Image (cartoon, rainbow, N blue to C red):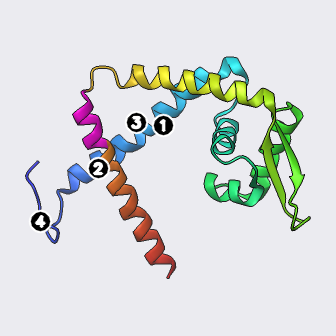
Amino acid sequence: MPATTPNEPHNIDWELRLGFLIHDVSRLRRSAFDRCMKPLNVTRSQWWVLAYLSREDGMTQSQLADELDLGKVAVGGLIDRLEKSGLVRREADATDRRVNRVFLEPKSKQLVARLRKINHRMNERILAGLPDDKLEHTAGTLAAMKRNLIDYLQAEEA
């Protein structure tokens, strides 16, 4: 594809193919990830909650909802199921009793370690044969697209 200047329009066919390709890769990766998680009885949404908490244990339910781009009720249901499984616990915030903080239970830390290994193996398989320089370039391109989308969405809110 020939390079374009910042003010020059892109080829419409290329833009459509790129959008579909990004969507398809994301959808297929989610399906593959779900298949890997099924034997552990963990949904992708539950894994995301555990993953965020493993990076910042004690997040509030509102923070989790914002990070996961889910409603507070949906996150509450996820936390309910994780709590029933003994993977997380809720505690009232020390300064504001209306706020619940969510913490990992010891058994979830072992599960998170297993899930990370499974995720790593899956990534190795789906990235097989791709040289590091191409992966770095792709990651940089996707990060730039993400920044542009965030900027676009923030500008629309203003």
Q: What element carries label 2?
A: helix
Q: Pointer 4: what residue?
A: 5
Q: What stretch is highlighted in magenta?
A: 131-138
Disc 4 residue crowd, few under 14, some 14–19, many 20+, Cα 10 Å? few
Q: Pointer 2: what residue?
A: 141
**Residues marked 1 and 3 touching at CB (< 8 Å):** yes
Q: Looking at this rendering, what residue extends furthest in the left direction?
A: 2
Q: Distance between the residues labelled 3 and 2?
A: 15 Å
Of the numbered discs in the image, which one, if any, rests on residue 27? 1
Residue toward you, 18 or 97? 97
Query: Does the magenta segment cover residue 106?
Result: no
Q: Distance between the residues labelled 1 and 2?
A: 19 Å
- Residue 68: x, y in percent? 63, 51
Q: What element carries label 1?
A: helix
Q: Pointer 3: what residue?
A: 25
Which amino acid, by three-letter code, is at mark 2? Thr
Q: Is mark 3 on a helix, strand or loop?
A: helix
Residue lying at 69% horizontally and 59% vertically, measured from the top left: 63
Which amino acid, by three-letter code, is at mark 3? Val
The tag earlier along the polypeptide, 3 or 2, is: 3
The tag earlier along the polypeptide, 1 or 4, is: 4
Mark 3, mark 2: which one is toward the viewer? 2
Q: Distance between the residues labelled 4 and 3?
A: 27 Å
Residue 56 lies, with reference to residue 158, above or below; the image says above
Residue toward you, 46 or 50? 50
The tag earlier along the polypeptide, 1 or 2, is: 1
Residue lying at 89% horizontally and 34% vertically, measured from the top left: 84
Residue lying at 85% horizontally and 62% vertically, measured from the top left: 99
